[in-house]
Image: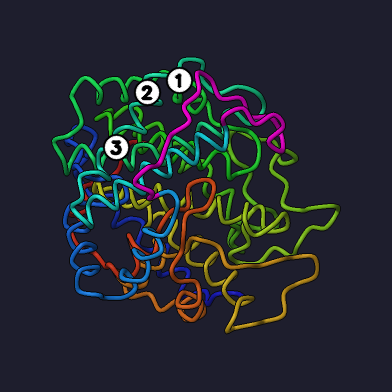
Amino acid sequence: MRLPTLFLLSLCALAPAARAKNDPSHTPFLHPGILLNRAQLDLIKQRVAAGTEPQKTAFSALLKSELAALNYTPSPRASVECGPYSKPDLGCKDERRDATAAYTQALAWVVTGNEKYARNAIRIMNAWAGTLIGGHLNDNGPVQAAWAASVWPRAAEIIRATSTFWEKEDITRFQKMLVTQYVPSLIHGCDENGNKEVAMAEALINIGVFNDDRVLFADGVRMWRGRVPACIYLKSDGPSPIVPPSALPSSAPWGNKSHVPPLVDGLLQETARDPHHANMTFASIVDAAETARQQGLDLYAEQGARITAAMEFQAQFLAPNNVKSPPNLEFALEPTWEIAFNHYHSRLGVALPTMAKVIPTNRPTGADSNHMVWETLTHGDIGAVGLPPVLGSVAK
């Protein structure tokens, strides 16, 4: 389904408004400010207490997860080695699971006020900060670092901003771990499939915020701006997708097993591969934009046409829309879309009629094995609560 040209142009027109006169490069970061702000956390707690949907059901699902277990035990490693297709998997799933558990426990702490959850999150983060010294190895080491470092700062940001339980020296040690054990695997980007590089961009942005490091934040923003146009196709790109600045066309293929899908508005670079990898890309794009927006930088406006087109393109093939999918393409519900839908639909009033029908069928979203985590709880129908004004643009 091709989106109306006027609709796409109207979203493109939002971009100049995001570039206000003020340069925020010397503006202090707002905390908490990775995906969530304090007013947003308060509203989530209020909604759960009042039994308001979708937060009520979403939080119930979180509490039932083993990631929220009060006896959760982390499995830190001195180094993490991740080969292709998880062969070998020496700490890869353990690391991602522990990062997600720390974020889960942090959210449970905010909603319930039970300090055991906060102390569990701290215990998980301290365990890794005191153990990981050998970085991320093998072919999938860099993307493993990106997935984990996208989630660790979410948990750390909540705990540091909402409790007094985390000792200052432990916070410093955790910050050092992010810089020494993750940033070297992220900073140079990736010349392969887009899902890897946009995950790296998100991780750098998140680390930048938590560590109050404007340079890292700007590095992540530049990486995001360079890669996102090459991840989602629009007709306005011309007869071929945009080639990312760090990659050859052959290293970021749009086809799969000799099948190249028709280039239509909203096609994600890995749509032909499978729905999960395509939406891992989508989630990283949006999560990074959400954190930037929490800090007053409107990346959403810069690529609104692509992001909304990707949602509407996918949604048409899902229930209850049920348009017959093109040959050799698969579409499925994924634990994402809530954050983007909340921004464009709930905050800005963009209709998104096709995805609007899918969102209720996808609730509550859970926690996948990488970085799509509890989106219905954190952003379902949340709106613009607590958002700062748009401050300006990080230098490109």
Q: Is residue 343 visible?
A: no
Q: Residue furthest front?
A: 71
**Residue 387 or residue 335, whichever sits in front:** 335
Q: Which image quarter: residue 88?
A: top right
Q: Amino acid at mark 2?
A: Ala
Magenta stretch bounds: 68-91
- Residue 179: name its quadrant: top left
Q: Is residue 169 above or below residue 151?
A: above
Number of numbered markers: 3
- How far apart in space, not on screen, are marks 3 and 1 (Cα)? 16 Å
Q: Of the residues under marks 3 and 1, which one precedes in the sequence? A: 1
Q: Is residue 13 above or below residue 164?
A: below
How many neighbours does mark 1 have within 10 angstroms: few (below 14), some (14-19), or many (20 or more)? some
Q: Position of residue 72 (x, y in %)?
A: 40, 41
Q: Is residue 336 magenta?
A: no
Secondary structure type for disc 2:
helix
Q: Which residue is mark 2?
A: 129
The answer to whether residue 290 is left or right of residue 241 is left
The image shows residue 67 at horizontal and vertical percentages of: 43, 48
Q: CA distance from mark 3 to mark 2?
A: 12 Å
Q: Which residue is mark 1?
A: 132
At horizontal 22% and vertical 52% (from top left) the residue drawn is 110
Tell which of 131 and 70 is nearer to you: 70
**Residue carrying label 3:** 156
* Contact between labelled residues 1 and 2, with CB atoms less than 8 Å apart: yes
Q: Is residue 258 left or right of residue 318?
A: right
